[in-house]
């Protein structure tokens, strides 16, 4: 099993908090957006105990997220980059390979909703291209998508096609006006929108706009059907405190004094042990 | 009776550079300029929504397991060639149109010579030989063998 934490740090130096988070959650992967200020300081802090993290920068030096992992460079292999997306082929020592896609998509400050939706059709095509190259669709997609789970770019059949239930995602794809859709993603973040949970989202904003959701769930993890069995819903959390220190203000929204305007998320992947039979039967063919 | 040629001299198709052929020439040039430590690839994406030619331009690093870096996308109508729509991925650009070959060359030059691409090329070039020196030699030999005489 591997534990992932993902956090958008708002370009703040939160290296101590991130190290505490990784230690407390026993993380195997630490994935950070807007983290240029911590990238050099973080590794020694992550490794201050018994942990042995490696930094995994992209060869081109311009990844949208910083990745630290307890797996070394032979197991976390840079595969493709394109500005807003970074693709790594993860080869766990005791499990099947999977494709990790890290993202930090365009902010609503710079892109209209319609533009975001249009860009999602390109990014989803790019994910499919890379899946075709690696020859499987064991893909996990993580990042600050700057869209809520219900928005067109996420839900659209030619966008990320990310749906709220495992059962729907397991159907792999559908036909839309005679054309095959993109393969589904399962988006488990739907259950982190609103309600009385301590974190009714991962990001909070107040504006004078007549339509304002206040809480947003921009930080998401999406799972392809071939990884559904490896992804327990119970392992997914939005984190509101680290070592007893709340990341929220007294009003219950992310505190930029303490940390970031985004809250971290945590999830688990249970790797399947490699056997001859299993490696032939799991994965399936990349579809359009 | 001799038939009079009312067509005149037909333009040779081979002499008309298409946006795709222009990009392929630039892709070849990167390999030559870096002793094939870096190569570039122009791929045509399926585009079922329209009949446009949809291209992506990637740098490929053979010694890093064929790691790829996407620089930009381009789309055009194969019958008209221009305008060409371009999106610069590394500089996070939006789609923009260029109306003729000169504008296209300027736009592609602007992307390939941008700071972001130069930084990436420098970084990739520095890492390429360190990765697997044996594979570099194999890649060069393979390239020489495939060059037409």
Image (tube, grey):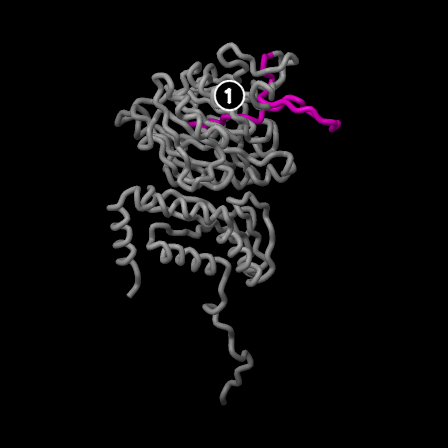
Tell me the residue at 74%/27% (across/down). Answer: A208
Depth order, front residue of B63/A92:
B63
- The percent coordinates of residue A221 (x first, y second) are 50, 26
Q: Would you say A217 lies left or right of B118 here?
A: right
Dot 1: few (<14), some (14–19), or many (≥20) neighbours within 10 Å? many
Quarter of the view holding residue A12: top right
Majority secondary structure of magenta residues: loop
Location of residue A139 (image quadrant): top left
Quarter of image, res B104: bottom right
Q: Nearer the viewer, residue B37 or A121?
A: B37
Between A26 and A210, which is closer to the camera in this rendering?
A: A26
Instruction: Relative to A39, say whether B119 is above or below.
Output: below
State the residue in front, A50 or A79. Answer: A50
Compared with B35, A5 (above or below) is: above
**Image quadrant containing the N terminus of chain A:** top left
Secondary structure under the numbered disc 1 in the rendered image: strand
Q: Is residue A286 magenta?
A: no
Q: Can the viewer see residue A242? A: yes
Residue A120 screen position, x and y as percent: 55, 37
The residue carrying mark 1 is A265
Residue A244: give x, y in percent of width and height. Answer: 51, 10
Which residue is located at x 33 percent, y 45 percent?
B128
Give residue B111's position: percent from left, percent from top.
Answer: 52, 52
Q: Name the chain letter of the residue that bears numbered label 1.
A: A
| Left or right, residue A44 beside residue A64 | left
Magenta stretch, residue numbers: A197-226
Eyeballing the image, is A153 above or below B85?
Answer: above
Residue A171 shows in the view: no
Q: Residue furthest top?
A: A244
């Amino acid at each position: 099993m591997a534990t992932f934490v993902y956090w958008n740090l708002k370009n703040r130096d939160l290296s101590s908090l991130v190290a505490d988070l990784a230690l407390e959650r026993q993380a195997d992967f630490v994935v950070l957006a807007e983290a240029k200020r911590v990238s050099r300081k973080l590794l020694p802090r992550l490794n201050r105990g018994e942990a042995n993290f490696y930094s995994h920068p992209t060869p081109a030096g311009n990844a949208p997220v910083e990745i630290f992992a307890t797996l070394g460079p032979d197991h976390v292999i840079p595969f493709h980059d394109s500005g807003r997306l970074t693709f790594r082929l993860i080869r766990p020592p005791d499990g099947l390979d999977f494709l990790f896609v890290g993202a930090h998509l365009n902010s609503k400050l710079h892109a209209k909703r319609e533009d975001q939706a249009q860009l999602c059709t390109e990014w989803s095509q790019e994910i499919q291209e890379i899946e075709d190259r690696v020859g499987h669709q064991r893909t996990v997609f993580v990042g600050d998508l700057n869209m809520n789970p219900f928005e067109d770019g996420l839900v659209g059949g030619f966008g990320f096609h990310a749906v709220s239930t495992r059962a729907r995602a397991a159907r792999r794809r559908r036909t839309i006006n005679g054309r095959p859709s993109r393969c589904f993603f399962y988006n488990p973040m739907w259950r982190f929108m609103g309600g009385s949970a301590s974190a009714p989202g991962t990001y909070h904003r107040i504006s004078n706009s007549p339509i304002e959701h206040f809480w947003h769930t921009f930080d998401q993890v999406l799972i392809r059907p071939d990884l559904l069995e490896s992804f327990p819903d119970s392992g997914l959390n939005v984190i509101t405190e680290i070592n007893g220190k709340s990341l929220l203000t007294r009003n219950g929204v992310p505190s930029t004094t303490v940390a970031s305007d985004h809250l971290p998320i945590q999830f688990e992947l249970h790797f399947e042990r490699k056997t001859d039979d299993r490696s032939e039967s799991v994965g399936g063919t990349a579809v359009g | 009776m001799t038939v009079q040629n009312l067509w005149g001299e037909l333009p040779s198709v081979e002499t008309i550079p298409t946006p795709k052929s222009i990009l392929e020439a630039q892709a070849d040039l990167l390999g030559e300029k870096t002793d094939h430590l870096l190569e570039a690839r122009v791929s045509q994406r399926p585009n079922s929504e329209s009949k446009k030619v949809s291209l992506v331009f990637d740098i490929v690093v053979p010694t890093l397991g064929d790691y790829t870096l996407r620089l930009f996308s381009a789309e055009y109508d194969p019958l008209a060639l221009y305008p060409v729509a371009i999106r610069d991925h590394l500089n996070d650009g939006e789609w923009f149109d260029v109306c003729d070959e000169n504008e296209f060359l300027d736009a592609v030059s602007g992307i390939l010579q941008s700071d972001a691409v130069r930084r990436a090329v420098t970084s990739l070039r520095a890492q390429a030989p360190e990765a697997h020196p044996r594979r570099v030699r194999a890649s060069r030999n393979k390239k020489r063998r495939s060059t037409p005489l």
